Each structure stands twice: as structure tokens, then as C-alpha cells.
Amino acid sequence: MIDIQDNTCCCGCGACSQRCPQSCITMQEDDNGFLYPHVDVEACVGCGLCEQVCPYLNEEDKRSGAATAIAACNPDEQVRTGSSSGGVFTLLAQEVIAQGGVVFGARFDDQWNVLHDCTDSGDGLMAFRGSKYVQSAIGDSYCRVEGLLKQGRKVLFSGTPCQIAGLRLFLGKEYDDLLLVDVACHGVPSPKVWREYLPSASGGSPLTAVNFRSKTTGWKNYSVLIGDKSRLHDDDRFMGCFLKNYSLRPSCFNCRFKAGHSGADITLADFWGIQTVAPHLDDDKGTSLVIVHTEKGQHHLDRCRMNQETVDYSQALRANPSLEHSATCPNDYDAFWQLFNGGNPSQAIRKYGRLYDSGFMMRVKRMLAALLKGLRR
């Protein structure tokens, strides 16, 4: 029976809940807004299936073989503009759908919560495009994936490395028709922090749009769009709490699923540092870093028409440490949560989400960035 004694040893993937034959495990939020399994002990029959699919109790080996690193961009400029980086996810997803397959990804619901869902249409992919800096509720997605695979459908499942690891254990076998795509994950922020932040960020007005990675100010110096309000990411307090690691799930500080350990076929990331690795591919519109772990992943990638160039993995890693390294827990992590849960969530976000000490320093940074951009021209 699943019994979480240490919250750093649960990533909230929900594999245990979905595999339970008695449906006696539910995913419930803790005080910080993260989902953890809770067992109805009286209904549990002690079958042990929940423990067999837990990625923390059954750590898998790294995929064998050397990974290939690729810098890539979607040639469709409209798609690339609407994507967080180079738009490669859309290319992979379109190829699977063209073969009659189904694509799983994270989307917003009507209340701007983040959840996992699926689509088998090109139009449906738009909801999955772009980064969502909130941990998604996986729901019954693993069960749906298994059902589709047993029907003979092709499936692309995209998610964080821990979600990929959970799905592989849940399925318990390899499927030729399943393409697993994870993202280079900095860590997953609390849905509760996101819910508390939204009203102040939107000014209380009904929301019509959220974009964590708007490229209206460029790809590198992206903006956060919430409703009709847009601010540079380094001036947004929710992003500050995320980038400074205050709002991250405890398990993110010791992630076991990076660097190929999730079992993904392909890893997607922003190619930060592209200006030094392959400057001719840097137009500040977004470039994807694609890490190919398996022959299956390479086969799917070969079917996609895109602008690409193979690069040295060690060069790609320099500016993308999230590929292999976990986030560092702040010394005052507990202080943030004490203030947040002590009746002052807005104050906690304002205080700890400040990325710079003063507005003056922020203006200096932006002026230097604009100057350097002008010199490069």
C-alpha cells in the first residue's frame, strides 16, 4: 500500500491512483497545493499494484546509448511564434495525428487550471502549445493511453520527466505505437500559488488569455501575458517565485528522472545559448533543443520537415543545466510557505517573487540588453 512519509519522495504522477483495482486511492492537495495519494485503508485489499507502478519505489535505468542533440525550428513561422521555443512539439504531434494517432499534453481548463488531456485533431493541438508553469493534474490520462494503445492507436504522450516515468511503469511494457516526449523541466510550481496569484495579476477582470512565454518582446526576454496585462518575465512575481524555486514541489529538488532516466524517446527544451553554439540559427524567434534518446524517437523526428542542425551535447548542456541537474532548494523555502499559508499569500508572492532588488537595477539590465542587441546588428 502506498504510504507517503516523506513528501520529497512523491512527484504526484498519479500512477498509483489510476492502477488501483479498488479505486481506493485518490489524489488530494496538501496545504501547499500539491497532489499526493490518499488511501482508503478499509477498501484496500493489499494487492500491491500501487507500489509496483510508483517511480520512486521502482527507479528505472537510464536509456542505453548516447543521446543526440539537435537545434531545430519549425519552418511554419506562425506555429513557431505561438510556441515557447522552436515549435518542434507541434511537428511531432502533427505527424502522429496524420497517422490516425492521439496526442496527450497539458492545457488550461475554463478556470485556467492546468490539466492533461488528449486530441486527435490538428486544431486541438493549439491548446497544448506553449509552456504551462504549473504542475498539471494528470487525471485518468494513463488509463486513457493504455486503452488507446490496446485499440491499436498510435499515441504521443508529452509531459514532465516524472510523468513519463510514471506512465511507463503504469503500462508495464513497451509499445511500438507509443512515442514518449518529455521536457527539460526546471521544476513544477504549485497550482495553489497560481490560483492565488491570478486575481491580482488580472486585476479581477475575467480572463480571456494566459501566455507564460509571449514572444512580443522577443524569445530570450519573453513576456508573461495574463488577460490584457503583459509584463516582462523578470517583472512578474509568479515567475519570480518559480525561477527562484520557492513555489516548486519538494521532489523537484532531487529529481530522479532527468538525463534520460525518465524513459522518454525525445526530450524537448529551449535552446538557451544557441547564440554561442550556432549563432546562424539565432533570430530571437525561438529555437528548440531536441535530445533524441532512442531509435524510435529518431524515426519519428526524421518524418518531420524542419530546419535543423546536429550539435555537440556538451555544448548544448552548458546553458541548459535543467537537462541533468535538479533545482536548488532556497534556504528560506519554508519561510515562503509559512507566510503564504499564514493568511498572506499575496504578500508571500510579492516578497519572494522579486527577481531584482530594485526597479533601477531592472532598468539597467534592460538597457544593457537593448544595447547589446543593437551592437549585434
Image (spheres, rainbow, N blue to C red):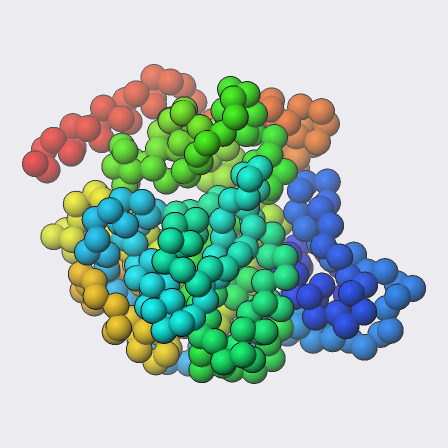
Quadrant in the picture for residue 300 = bottom left
Q: Where the C terminus falls, by quadrant?
A: top left
In the rendered view, would you say 330 is above or below 175? above
In the rendered view, would you say 193 is above or below 18? above
Residue 211 in the image: state x and y as whole percent: 41, 38
Q: Residue furthest top?
A: 360
Count of marks, rendered view? 0
In the rendered view, would you say 320 is above or below 330? below
Please name the residue shown 78% across and 65% down the image. 23
Q: Where the N terminus falls, by quadrant?
A: bottom right
Please name the residue shown 39% across and 50% down the image. 126
Q: Residue furthest right?
A: 42
Horizontal side of residue 245 vs 345, given as left or right:
left
Residue 149 in the image: state x and y as whole percent: 53, 77
Can residue 346 be seen here? The reply is yes
Please name the residue shown 73% across and 50% down the image. 28
Can residue 331 be seen here? The reply is no
Depth check: give the residue in front, 360 or 32.
32
Depth check: give the residue in front, 184 or 179.
179
Quadrant in the picture for residue 96 = bottom left
Horizontal side of residue 141 vs 217, given as left or right:
right
In the rendered view, would you say 360 is above or below 268? above
Please name the residue shown 77% across and 72% down the image. 21
Q: Residue furthest left?
A: 377
Quadrant in the picture for residue 143 = bottom right
Residue 182 in the image: state x and y as whole percent: 44, 62
Residue 192 in the image: state x and y as whole percent: 63, 38
